[in-house]
Amino acid sequence: MNFEHTEDRRMLADSLNRFISEQYAFDARDRIAKSEHGFSKEIFQQFAELGVIGALFSEADGGFGGGGFDIAVVFEALGRGLVVEPLLGAVMVGEAISAAGTDAQKEKLADIINGVTVAAFAHDEADTHYERTRVATKAERIGDGWVLQGAKAVVPQGEQADLFLVSARTSGNVDDEAGISLFLVPAKTAGLTVRGCPAIDGGRVAELSFDGVKLGADALLGAEGQGHATLERAIGRGVLALCAEALGAMEAAKAATLDYLRTRKQFGTLIGSFQALQHRMADLLLEIEQARSAVINASAAIDTGDRVTRERALSAAKFSIGRIGALVAQESIQMHGGIGMTWELPLPHYAKRLVMIDHQLGDEDHHLQRYIALGKESGKEVAA
């Protein structure tokens, strides 16, 4: 397998890293993350103009990338800059529309790619605990349309979203895989209430309440009751994006720690010369390389046709990222000493983001169990 990026991806990475370093310095990012909106619409529009959002979509959908490595390149750069703009929602909602949308629904992709429409993924509920099939929000068919009733929790940048991808149960029990349907819900739909709050790692999240929300027949994405496969594909893209983002954050934390070890003196000696710290740093570098290998494996697998291979690679990567991300956060802060806990320093913000990425779209325990379950599923298929 050739692990070298294409020339187009290298150029995209260079331009994106340069833009973030020049326009998204830590002080600017901190102001944006703590702002009323939770992100900068101007910066988001600039990302679109740079082609960053377009790189997340295939040519058939109006973009110029869309592969696993395209997603990884973009989100690794975003992770280095702790970017809070809603590109994760764009890639997840865009994947669902691309996979199951009608021609009319796919017309919405152009505005997502151009940064005109902010899309948000609304699937998690208060008691789902990462289980993808657990959907209590209900959609009832009324005439030619639908009525939604229920709630969604922790929707990233939900307050500023223009369009939501919402999962709802149209049949079956609350944990059934069958009976899940997907709907495209405009933010200004009557009966939809959005309540936001700051996120612990920057930006904002929202809770959505659906009180008799009436939707037309054209709101249904894909076939009724068969949304799980589309949901899985969208979440898979999101998992890869988060893993790549975490890798970028790890690289930034590593660079900051190495710089500190090379400049901080104790008793007149650079602390980087202490053998104990050298050993800890070497172990950390090896772990980060393992994380990179996991992201590469997931990037390559996400475009394969075999579902089990794809999903196992994604869960393996998310498990690795969760474990290694927590280790990088802990070790980087400990090797900085007391200053590592100083909120004015970028490092603790990277550490917090790494910890919180573990809890998005399934933590390491969840994905370890899922990896094992998928292996058993694969074994049964071989035996059959």
Image: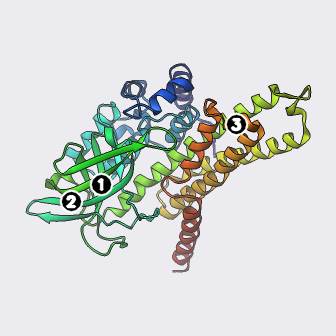
Q: Earlier in the sequence, mark 1 or mark 2?
A: 2
Give the residue type at disc 3. Answer: Gly
x and y, in percent, of residue 115 in the image: 34, 31
Dot placed on the residue nearer the N-terminal end, 3 or 1: 1
Give the amino acid at mark 1: Val
Answer with left or right where residue 239 lies relative to residue 174.
right
Please give the count of numbered marks on the rendered protein: 3
Q: Considering the numbered disc 1 on the image, is that residue within a helix, a strand or a loop?
A: strand
The answer for how far apart the CA atoms under marks 3 and 1 are is 40 Å
The CA distance from mark 1 to mark 2 is 10 Å
Q: Which mark is residue 166?
A: 1
State the residue at coordinates (38%, 35%): 63
Would you say the residues marked 3 and 1 are in contact, meaning their CB atoms lie under 8 Å apart? no
Q: Secondary structure at mark 2?
A: strand
What residue does disc 2 label? 148
Question: Which residue is located at x 34 percent, y 65 percent?
Answer: 135
- The local secondary structure at tag 3 comes to helix
| Mark 1 burial class by Cα count in 10 Å: few <14, some 14-19, many 20+ | many
Query: Where does residue 133 sit, x and y in percent of width and height?
Result: 39, 67
Vertical placement of 85 versus 179: above or below?
above
What amino acid type should be assigned to the residue bearing mark 2?
Leu
Residue 299, can we see it?
A: no
Residue for badge 3: 340
Q: Position of residue 8 (x, y in %)?
A: 52, 29
User: Is the residue marked by circle 2 packed among few (<14), some (14-19), or many (20+) residues within 10 Å?
Assistant: many
